[in-house]
Image (spheres, rainbow, N blue to C red):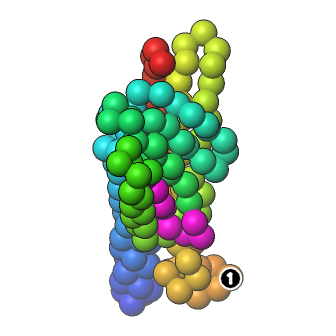
């Protein structure tokens, strides 16, 4: 009986660790988006999968997901480009621009465990998913 209890505690601990890691990935993705967007002055395009905007320095920034990575591609005003790819194991990165009474951009990051990260034996294994969302509100662009 004690062995079963210990096994359940160990599985629960592994599930908690996996959930925490997934939450941190989603949080980091949105922290990066928020940091990159601080000098946002003009939204160029927002689709389900792309967020493109101009900055105060006249740079163009494109944020999107490529496979399970988040990519921040910049076209700088001096004609150069830079691309940073963040390995965050994202299942999805969604953008929405709502132009209703209060203009806002919604950004949703979803991270999901891969099969080799799952806890326990299939079909009763634990598969983790975490999502986090932020909004840029009152945009007077």
Quarter the N terminus occupies: bottom left
Q: Main secondary structure of the magenta part?
A: strand
The one nearer the camera, 66 or 77, is 77
- Would residue 116 be seen by someone viewing this image from the given angle? yes
Q: Residue at x 61, y 37 (%)?
A: 45
| Placement of 95 over or under 2, stated as above or below | above
Rendering coords of residue 82 (x, y %)? 39, 60
Picture quadrant where residue 15 is located: bottom left
Residue range highlighted in magenta: 66-74
The one nearer the camera, 107 or 55, is 55
The one nearer the camera, 83 or 19, is 83
Q: Residue at x 48, y 60 (%)?
A: 71
- Would residue 72 be seen by someone viewing this image from the given angle? no
| Placement of 82 over or under 133, stated as above or below | below
Q: Is residue 31 magenta?
A: no
Q: Residue at x 50, y 51 (%)?
A: 63
Image check: 122 left or right of 87?
A: right
Q: Residue at x 58, y 88 (%)?
A: 121
Picture quadrant where residue 122 is located: bottom right
């Amino acid at each position: 009986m004690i062995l079963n209890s210990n096994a359940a505690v160990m599985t629960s601990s592994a599930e908690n660790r996996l959930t925490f890691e997934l939450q941190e990935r989603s949080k980091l993705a949105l922290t990066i988006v928020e940091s990159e967007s601080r000098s946002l002055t003009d939204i160029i395009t927002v689709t389900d999968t792309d967020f493109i905007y101009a900055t105060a320095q006249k740079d163009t920034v494109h944020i999107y997901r490529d496979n399970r990575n988040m990519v921040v591609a910049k076209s700088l005003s001096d004609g150069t480009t830079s691309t940073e790819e963040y390995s965050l194991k994202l299942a999805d990165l969604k953008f929405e621009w709502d132009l209703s009474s209060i203009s806002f951009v919604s950004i949703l990051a979803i991270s999901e465990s891969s099969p080799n990260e799952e806890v326990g034996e299939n079909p009763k294994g634990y598969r983790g998913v975490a999502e986090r969302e932020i909004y840029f509100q009152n945009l007077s662009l």
